[in-house]
């Protein structure tokens, strides 16, 4: 499978350009666009941080913060050089991650007080981007993991929490174990969610919210939207894990081998329902990509 070609999706590229320009117009009307120089995908991701931050500042009456966002419609922040280009890598205090009606999970918005993560964590993230790129996932992460929010440091074998939220596309929130190979796996999983959200939006795909399927990952019946997301993001991590295993050893190799074994069983349990769920997606190009990844992962 040509993984880089898999993630190049023209409707999404158009979405990034159009949405970034629209947000700029909302925040700084009458001024010419000022791209960050980080690329269209980064402009798109950072623009959503600026929009979210400006809305929150307006609601709370924080004039200084509001003025910062309107003057910086791409939420300019210090970036970290990586093989995929500059990334924004932060490690905020968990108490700085609010919850609100926009998200069931905590989140972080870049603002005037944003500081880059400590150098060790930025180096860790940069190493994870190298590993992902070397295994064929550079295109995915280049466009869909622009802002990296590192959360808790955990031990290998502990449950690692990670997530994305739809209002901050291109941003990934992750625990980590201090190993770039494991972090790359979780980058790919969360960037996969961002990719699919953007692809559904870009193609105008509306998934029937009454349709539901049994999710082996959640061990419960889930709406088709969540089922399709799982049947895309987990297979991506399986493909990555299978490719990277030959370059790992010791505890990390044992951990990833066990992970892949478990995912094989879970994915197999989704095989009967996946084709039926795919029929809910009308865009042929998107449907074929989702089917190809699921099918390839079943062969591992």
Image (cartoon, rainbow, N blue to C red):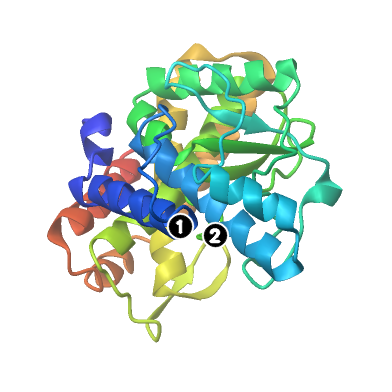
Q: Is residue 12 left or right of residue 22?
A: left
In the image, residue 183 sits, relative to residue 21, either above or below, namely above
Q: Is residue 194 left or right of residue 5?
A: right
Q: Residue 124's image quarter?
A: top right
Q: Tag 1, which secondary structure?
A: helix
Left or right side of 120 for 166: left
Mark 1 closeness class: few <14, some 14–19, many ≥20 residues within 10 Å:
many
Residue 133 x %, y %? 40, 21
Total marks shown come to: 2
- Residue 217: which numbered mark, if any? 2
Outermost left residue: 284
- Of the 4 image quadrants, the one containing the C terminus is top left
Q: Is residue 266 above or below residue 225?
A: above
* Image vertical order of residue 111 relative to residue 59, above or below: above
> Residue 220, how many percent across, how many down?
56, 73
| Alpha-carbon span between mark 2 and mark 1 | 8 Å
Quarter where residue 151 is shown: top right
Residue 225 sits above or below residue 86 on the image = below
Which of the image's four quarters has the N terminus?
Answer: top left
Q: Can residue 97 be seen at all in this image of the molecule?
A: yes
**Camera-nearest residue between 248 and 164:** 164
> Crowdedness of circle 2 by 10 Å Cα count: few (<14), some, many (20+)?
some
Residue holding disc 1: 230
Residue projecting furthest to the front: 30
**Which is more toward the observer, 233 or 76?**
76
From the top left corner, tell me how far across and down residue 76 is, in percent: 56, 35
Precedes in sequence: disc 2 or disc 1: 2
């Amino acid at each position: 499978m040509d993984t880089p070609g898999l993630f190049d999706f023209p409707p999404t590229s158009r979405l990034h350009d159009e949405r970034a320009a629209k947000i700029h117009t909302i925040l700084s009307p009458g001024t010419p666009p000022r791209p960050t120089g980080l690329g269209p995908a980064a402009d798109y991701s950072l623009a959503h941080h600026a929009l979210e931050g400006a809305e929150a500042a307006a609601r709370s009456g924080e004039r200084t913060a509001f003025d910062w966002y309107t003057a910086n419609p791409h939420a300019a922040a210090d970036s970290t050089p990586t093989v995929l280009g500059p990334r924004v890598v932060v490690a905020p205090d968990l108490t700085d991650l609010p919850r609100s009606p926009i998200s069931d999970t905590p989140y972080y918005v870049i603002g005037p007080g944003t500081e880059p993560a400590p150098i060790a964590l930025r180096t860790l993230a940069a190493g994870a981007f190298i590993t992902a790129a070397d295994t064929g996932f550079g295109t995915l992460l280049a466009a869909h993991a622009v802002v990296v929010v590192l959360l808790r440091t955990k031990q290998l074998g502990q449950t690692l929490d990670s997530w994305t939220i739809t209002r901050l596309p291109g941003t990934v929130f992750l625990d980590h174990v201090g190993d770039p190979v494991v972090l790359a796996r979780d980058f790919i999983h969360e960037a996969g969610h961002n990719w699919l959200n953007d692809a559904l939006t870009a193609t105008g795909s509306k998934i029937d919210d009454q349709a539901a399927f049994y999710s082996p990952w959640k061990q419960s019946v889930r709406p088709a939207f969540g089922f399709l997301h799982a049947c895309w993001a987990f297979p991506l991590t399986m493909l990555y894990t299978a490719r990277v295993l030959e370059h790992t050893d010791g505890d990390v190799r044992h951990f990833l081998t066990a992970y892949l074994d478990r995912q094989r069983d879970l994915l197999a349990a989704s095989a009967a329902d996946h084709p039926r769920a795919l029929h809910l997606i009308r865009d042929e190009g998107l449907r074929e990509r989702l089917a190809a990844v699921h099918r390839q992962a079943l062969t591992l």
